[in-house]
Image: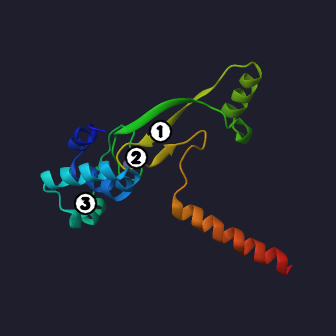
């Protein structure tokens, strides 16, 4: 992963703040160390992250670019994926896709993820990794549900 510094070099300070807050922890330790090196080289002040996130000038931009709803960056990662989650579709577009499915024609949808803060903008096949905290919460809900059903 030599390109991590090249990628970071293309980010402005606001994007870098979102990156550190939301994406940094998704990297393995050696890459995290490279990121730390880079932040030092750039004299990036970690304590200013919240200010950079709260005062993001891109929030006020009114261009026609497709932007991440969380960090407002236009650095998005798009991937055409064969749509497999057809059973949940109800819209016309979805029904057409299901009909096409019967003819063995694949329907492709865009999967869009923010490259800066890893926000999932479009996730047609539900590929978004579930965060650990969400998993823990789900576990707690299951326990509660279990308690409630046994009490009834
Ligand atoms: Zn983003």
**SS label for mark 1:** strand
Seen from the viewer's position, the closer of residues 24 and 69 is 24
Question: What kind of element bears circle 3?
Answer: helix
- Is label 2's Cβ within 8 Å of ligand 1? yes
Q: Is 139 located above or below residue 8 in the figure?
A: below
Q: Which mark is residue 68?
A: 2
Tag 2 and tag 3, C-beta contact below 8 Å: no
Which of disc 3 and disc 2 is earlier in sequence? Answer: 3
CB atoms at circles 1 and 3 under 8 Å apart?
Answer: no
Query: In this rendering, is residue 97 above or below 33?
Result: above
Cβ(mark 1) to ligand 1 < 8 Å? no
The residue at 71%/42% (across/down) is 88
How far apart in space, not on screen, are marks 1 and 2 (Cα)? 9 Å
Residue 23 horizontal/vertical position (percent):
37, 52
Label 2 sits on a secondary structure element that is loop
**Which mark, by number, is residue 52?**
3
Q: In the visual, does 45 lie left or right of 85? A: left
Q: Name the residue under label 1.
A: 112
- Residue extending farthest right: 152
Percent across and percent down for residue 120 are: 48, 46
Q: For mark 1, does the 10 Å Cα neighbourhood hold few (<14), some (14 to 19), or many (20 or more) residues?
A: some
Q: Which residue is drawn at 21% across and 52% down?
A: 13
């Amino acid at each position: 992963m030599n390109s991590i510094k090249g990628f970071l070099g293309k980010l402005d300070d606001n994007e870098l703040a979102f990156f550190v807050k939301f994406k940094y922890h998704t990297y393995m330790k050696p890459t995290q160390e490279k990121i730390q090196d880079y932040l030092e080289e750039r004299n990036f002040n970690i304590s200013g992250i919240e200010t950079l996130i709260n005062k993001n000038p891109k929030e006020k931009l009114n261009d026609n670019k497709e932007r991440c709803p969380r960090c407002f960056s236009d650095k998005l990662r798009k991937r055409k994926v064969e749509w497999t989650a057809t059973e949940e579709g109800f819209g016309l577009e979805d029904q057409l896709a299901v009909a096409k499915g019967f003819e063995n024609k694949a329907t492709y949808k865009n999967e869009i993820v923010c490259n800066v803060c890893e926000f999932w903008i479009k996730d047609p096949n539900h590929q978004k990794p579930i965060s650990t905290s969400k998993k823990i919460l789900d576990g707690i809900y299951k326990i509660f549900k279990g308690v409630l059903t046994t009490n009834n």
